[in-house]
Amino acid sequence: MSIDVWFVMLPGVLALDMSGPAETFVLAGDAFRLHYIGPQPDVPTSIGLTMGGISPLPDTLPDGSLLVLPGVSDSRHQFSTPQALGVQHWLMRLQPAIHRQAITVMCVCSGALLAAKSGLLTGKQCTTHHDVITRLRDAAPGAVIKENRIFVQDGNIWTSAGITSGIDLALHLMNRLCGPEKALTVAREMVVWFRRSGDDPQLSPWLRYRNHLHPAIHRAQDALTAEPQKGWQLVDIAALAHVSPRHLTRLFQEHLGISVRDYLEQLRLAIAQQWLLQGRGVEQASIAAGFSSPRQFHRAKQRAIS
């Protein structure tokens, strides 16, 4: 089932604030369905191009929607126009659905100002571009402003620092909504690093150690994450990565700071923990994750926390 993503388009919209997250969601295939809405059918963008075919603001949004508020090139002026005021009133009408978390709001860059002017950030933790932080405080005196953050979540309200951080936030939301494999695949397609929030769970080897661009390591990691319970030998992993075992060992240490064996062990630990959370016994969880016995699983667990 596709998730509906609604981009609010105002005159002066920052092209990358909109196109960065939009391209990110499009690369996820049919996981997302994109809509572009606004108070007028055509809007000039920050780069001099005019975007057309924009649909009118709908009366309501379906539950489960993701609403994206991109920034504009001159937020002092362009968020004070009649068009922007119309969007503010529209957002106010959506507040009941937003408050019951039927709609997720994603603000990119100065888009947080639009949310603030509409009353969406009252009592919320939030951030925005560093040049707009002071004005965000004025627009949302009841908000808790976080400086020097890539993005901030408070419930179903997400705000980001701007420009490329919109891509970071889109990937993070994709991870939440579609799983890490989809987000990692898209990040690699875009040739960007997959940044994570400091609030994310620490035990996530599918995401950890993937902030590199070395194709041989990615080939090895793809094979291991696809079948972590398999009885892997270093020579087999190296063959799939198209390098020698010695070279693969050196690449893992150089780029990831861990061995191939330790990386595989972390994957298996994560799988065993998932089985345990599902109520399975230690022996069943250990064997299913690729450990030879519960004893080997416990030893690996001790190494991970030491």
Image (tube, rainbow, N blue to C red):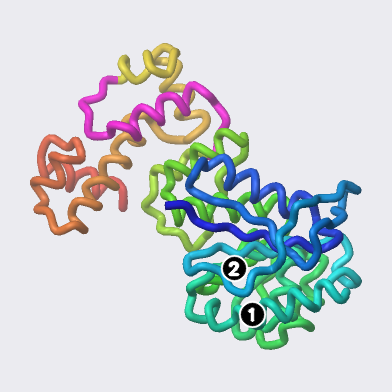
User: Residue 109's quadrant in the figure?
Assistant: bottom right
N-terminal label among 1 and 2: 2
The structure residue drawn at horizontal position 54% and vertical position 58%, both measured from the top left corner, is: 4
Stretch of the chain drawn in magenta: 211-233
Quarter of image, res 166:
bottom right
The x and y percentages for residue 204 are: 39, 49
Mark 1 and mark 2 residues within 8 Å of each other at the beta carbon: yes
Is residue 279 shown left or right of residue 107?
left
Q: Position of residue 50 (x, y in %)?
A: 86, 50
Q: Residue at x 81, y 73 (%)?
A: 84
- Residue 161 in sight here: no
93 lies above or below 148: below
Q: Which residue is mark 2?
A: 105
Helix, strand or loop at mark 2: strand
Disc 1 from disc 2: Cα separation:
9 Å
Q: Which mark is residue 120?
A: 1
Q: Position of residue 282 (x, y in %)?
A: 11, 51
From what the image shows, is residue 68 above or below residue 255? below
